[in-house]
Amino acid sequence: MEESVRLHGSMLEQIKQVFGCGEADVRAYSPLALAYIGDAVYDLVIRTVVVERANRSSNELHKRAIRYVNAKAQAQIIEELLEELTEDELAVYKRGRNAKSYTIPRNASPADYRKATGMEALLGYLYLQDKLERVLYLIRTGLQKAELEL
């Protein structure tokens, strides 16, 4: 990247600028593609908070983060958020929850894993629409309501 290039906008807009990504209709993305990016968004938010609150070894940071980045915790969070979701958001969550996933982690129940996938799809959908403020609101509110305060 040339040093003279000035980037503007959100992180998403800057990524699109630097890598020449075009505009796409996020509603057409598969729910598992949305969950894929939503998982990364959720993980980045949690890891950011964990690092900002405690400058510790990477092992200790990981132990703190995994309390929140797992299917059971995410299922709790989304259950607490359902009444907060708009009609559009609820539809995206349900598409993600009902998506056919061929693998389920050993440490997660199928029900929790489906709910977590739905939540990740919702977060991915919002992120790709550049609605980071809504993403952060939902994560913070969900953590508070599920009594999983960071």
Image (cartoon, grey):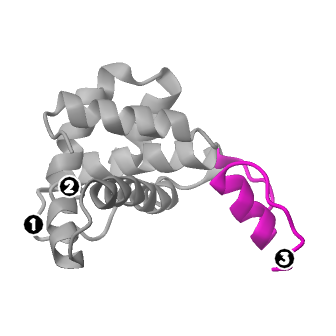
Secondary structure of the residue carrying numbered label 3: loop
> Which residue lies under the disc numbered 3?
3
**The disc labelled 2 sits on which kind of residue?**
Ala
Q: Amino acid at mark 3?
A: Glu
> Does the segment drawn in magenta span residue 13?
yes
Q: Which residues are magenta?
A: 1-26
- Location of residue 90 in the rendering, given as x and y in whole percent from the top left corner: 42, 30
Q: Which secondary structure dominates the residues rendered in magenta?
A: loop
Q: Nearer the viewer, mark 2 or mark 3?
A: 3
Determine if the magenta segment contains residue 15: yes
Task: Calculate the distance from the C-alpha at mark 1 to the C-alpha at mark 2.
Answer: 8 Å
Marks 1 and 3, the one that precedes in the sequence: 3
Residue contact at pointers 1 and 3, CB within 8 angstroms: no
Q: Is residue 55 above or below residue 50?
A: below
Q: Quadrant of residue 129?
A: top right
Sequence-wise first label, 2 or 3: 3
Q: Disc 2 marks which residue?
A: 71
Badge 1 is on which residue?
A: 107
What type is the residue that disc 1 sits on?
Asn
The extreme front residue here reads 55
Point out residue 6 in the picture as x, y percentages from the top left corner. 84, 62
Which class describes the residues within 10 Å of circle 2: few (<14), some (14-19), or many (20+)? many
- Along the horizontal axis of the image, is 95 left or right of 142? right
